[in-house]
Amino acid sequence: MAAKKNRYSTCVSVARGSPAAMRRALSEALRRSEYAEARLDYMRPDDVPGLLDALPPGLLRRRIVCTVRNRRDGGRYEGREGDRYETLGMVAAHRPFMLDVEHDALKRSRRLADALHASGTRLLVSWHSFARTPQPGALRRKVQEMFRYSDHVKIACMARNTDESIRMLELYRGIDRKGAGGGGRTLISFAMGDAGRMTRVLCMQLGSPYAYVSLGRAVAPGQLSLEEFRRLGKMLK
């Protein structure tokens, strides 16, 4: 990781509707956290290129994860998938620290997958289940499928109870850490919802490079604020 890494590094999810508000929030996030996630799906697609051009390249390429999530996967993007793919390609051309792309999108569009890989941008392949947590075997198969597209994978599922939360943490056990290119693999796995809140802290002890947090209002179900996360992290040191 390019930012100074500690055991409990955080990535602040920033969701703002205007370029000016997004820039201000990203600046605050990076002042207080190692990384920031720019939720570009909250913005008008036409505003995204200007925002990326205005961000300092050093910050964008070393500390900002970019996400353009559609509504089906918990985001705000409402346009056609083809148009979203074009936006993803444009974001990739700016070479952010990581570009979060859904596993299902890469499977549906070989053209998208080839274009993003050709861009040289580090992909964070993600999969979310807002309805349930699959059985352990299904989860492991899903993770292995995702690693075919990138050495960096994020998987999050809604947990109804402690057992389902533990399933998400058990994914760290037995993962082959060596990537296809000889580098290391990154797994980010946690449970969503109230039952999964503690997994957002415990995942750091199992190998996650950072935890997603908010600056106040949660962007995802069960997301901790930066202050809550830091308080819990101090107790576990």
Image (cartoon, rainbow, N blue to C red):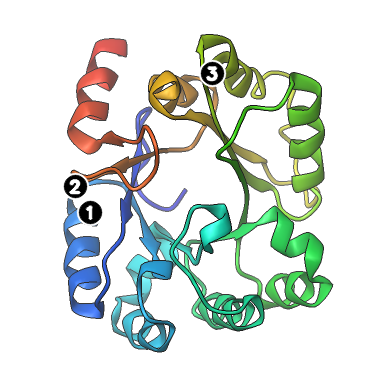
Task: State the mark number for residue 104.
Answer: none
The Cα–Cα distance between marks 3 and 1, rounded to whole angstroms, is 28 Å
Q: Amino acid at mark 2?
A: Arg
Residue sitting at x 36%, y 68%: 42
Q: Which residue is mark 3?
A: 165
In the image, 165: left or right of 139? left
Does 220 sit above or below residue 101? Answer: above
Residue sitting at x 71%, y 63%: 105
Dot 3 and dot 2 residues touching (CB under 8 Å): no
In the image, 3: left or right of 24? right
* Nearer to the camera, 107 or 78: 78
Q: Position of residue 94 (x, y in %)?
A: 49, 79
Q: Amino acid at mark 3?
A: Ser
Q: Which residue is mark 1?
A: 29
The Cα–Cα distance between marks 3 and 2, rounded to whole angstroms, is 28 Å
Q: Position of residue 199 (x, y in %)?
A: 45, 22
Task: State the mark number for residue 32.
Answer: 2
Q: How many marks?
A: 3
Estimate how packed mark 3 is, as few (under 14), some (14 to 19) or many (20 or more) residues with alpha carbons within 10 Å: many
Sequence-wise first label, 3 or 1: 1
Q: Amino acid at mark 1?
A: Ala
Does 192 sit above or below residue 124? Answer: above
- Foreground disc of the pair 3, 1: 3
Q: Position of residue 234 (x, y in %)?
A: 23, 18
Residue sitting at x 72%, y 70%: 117
Mark 1 lies on a secondary structure that is helix
Sequence-wise first label, 3 or 2: 2
Q: Position of residue 128 (x, y in %)?
A: 59, 43
Residue sitting at x 73%, y 29%: 139
In the image, 142: left or right of 74? right
Dot 1 and dot 2 residues touching (CB under 8 Å): yes
